[in-house]
Amino acid sequence: MELVIDQEQVINKDFSVIKEYIEENWDIGYSQLEISFSGLENDKREIFEVPEIREWVINSIHEEKIPWFFFLSKDVSSSSIKALAVCYCAEPVKQENGEIRYMPLENKMYQFIMVNHSNSVEFVKEYKFNECFNQEISYLIDKYFKNWLGGKNKK
């Protein structure tokens, strides 16, 4: 399932689409969701370069406590977790030639993983899932990030 967040929702910090999805699929939506952003087709920037999207992502994690790790696909071919991670972790860095490049910060990647894991743990507790879900999510997230960031766990 793909959930599309449009430009208006991003600008208004509207999380109703994802919250509605969670309410309707909390018991069957485990690890199946993909997320994308629309309304930027003519924008040449990457999504992590759009301040409104970066702010929406950060708010979704810290303020709304969306359990992304519970719902987003952890398949290595999925780009949803990567997109959110880069939006959260990349910071603009001015190069010697004056060009701005976005560089992911390691401490922010760690924070992204820890806060999202915490949000998923709380979700599992709130909806009274078996605790084994947290272990499975941790395992799958660890494997996902090792695969993405060049780890040896390619199974």
Image (spheres, rainbow, N blue to C red):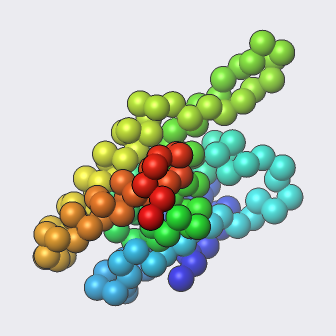
Residue 8 at x, y percent in the picture: 65, 63
Q: Residue at x 68, y 51 (%)?
A: 47
Residue 37 at x, y percent in the picture: 65, 64
Asked whether, in this view, residue 35 is left or right of residue 143, the answer is right
Q: Quadrant of residue 80?
A: bottom right
Asked whether, in this view, residue 34 is left or right of residue 128, the answer is right
Residue 103 at x, y percent in the picture: 62, 31
Q: Where 92 falls versus 133 (above or below)?
A: above
Instruction: Tell which residue pokes out farthest to the top in this image.
Output: 96
Compare residues 154 and 52 and report the one nearer the observer. 154
- In which quadrant will I find the C terminus? bottom left
Q: Residue at x 71, y 19 (%)?
A: 94
Q: Residue at x 75, y 26 (%)?
A: 100
Compare residues 129 and 152 and report the one nearer the observer. 152
One can see residue 6 in this view: yes
Q: Quadrant of residue 38?
A: bottom right
Asked whether, in this view, residue 124 is left or right of residue 18, the answer is left
How many marks are shown on the rendered structure? 0
One can see residue 145 in this view: no
Q: Residue at x 59, y 62 (%)?
A: 79
Residue 117 at x, y percent in the picture: 30, 54
